[in-house]
Image: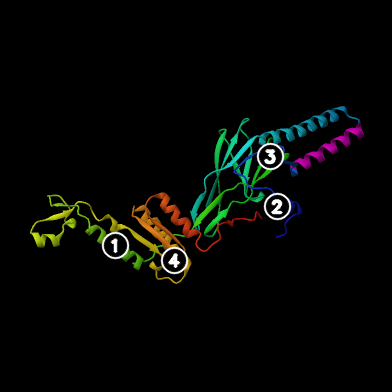
Amino acid sequence: MRVPISEKVSRWLAAKSPKKSRIVLSQKNIYIFPTSEGFAFLALLILMFLTAINYQNSLIYLLAFFLIVIFFMSIWMCFLNMSGLIISSLETGCCHEGQLAPYQIKLEAKKGIPLGLSIGFSKESLNHVELSLNSQVVTLTYNGLQRGRHAVPRIRLESRYPFGLIRSWTWLKLDGFVFVYPKAVKAHRVSSFTDRQSSQAAVKLSESLDDIKPYQAGDSSQRILWKKYAATDSLQIKAQEQAKTNSMWLTLDDYESVNIEDKLMNLSFDVCFYSSSRYSFGLDLPGLVIPFGVGDAHQRACLEALSLYKLNPVTVALDNR
């Protein structure tokens, strides 16, 4: 597909500008140009002037000058509609491979509520934004990204307010990222050597504790020390359960597939499953070890590690075709 010269110039200028977390629109970064309807309107004005000159008709002169005033007011109103708008990048988005990658930005208006705004990654994929308040969060999505950390490309913000004769637009370069995790695919997990070693160490640690108390009605039978019962003929139990035995290591060797990408998908599923089940687990990858943990933060750290495994830290998501 042939790229227009204007688009090449726009990309070259965008490559020279740095990324920011917050952008304020002003005359320095708002571009204005007539739309196709605007050019048709100008052609009509020229035709009216030629007619007025030919027939020396004052009413046609009056109507033509009135329409010229409307045209120049459209330019001014279209600029003021976007001027002063503040755009900022929010938290890093995330999704699994095959899902829509979300990216959130915040629009803040300090001088009234802008009307007729459209936003998207290119001129062909603009979506209308209806601002009902002075501040609003807009979520942009993109499909077809592979696993990794993807830098958010340029975002186009456009307005044709109020009559559609003039187009004002700007390109936004925000320093946001989207993490695309491996697709979650369930597979049979083979107990690895590190998992067995961790479990055996936990049992030895638990058996070395002296928190022993007499058995009472209602105590779990799984906590009874049968060896001590055989020696002393009295039921005794551990005061604390062997919670450490629930901790496990997740590694690439836990799965029978020979394909690394398949193993990462299997790990992604197990990370989500054990995290939702509140199990304590650690992730052991070649060159990276994430210790035992639970919770959403631990799950996200593990999934981000899987998404970046053997990849560059940052991948450009789009090229704004």
Residue identifier under label 4: 263
* 2 vs 1, front mark: 1
* 1 vs 4, front mark: 1
Q: Would residue 97 appear left or right of 15 to someone viewing this image?
A: left
Q: Would residue 58 appear left or right of 213 to someone viewing this image?
A: right
Q: Earlier in the sequence, mark 3 or mark 2?
A: 2
Q: CA distance from mark 2 to mark 4?
A: 39 Å
Residue identifier under label 2: 11
In front of the other: 63 or 151 = 151
Residue identifier under label 1: 201
Q: Amino acid at mark 4?
A: Lys
* 4 vs 3, front mark: 4
Q: Which residues are magenta?
A: 37-55
Q: Amino acid at mark 1?
A: Ala
Picture coordinates of residue 255, whole percent (x, y): 39, 68
* 3 vs 1, front mark: 1
Image: 204 above or below 63: below
Q: Would residue 154 appear left or right of 33 to someone viewing this image?
A: left
Q: Earlier in the sequence, mark 4 or mark 3?
A: 3
Placement of the C terminus among the 4 image quadrants: bottom right
Image: 156 above or below 247: above
Q: Residue at x 42, y 50 (%)?
A: 297
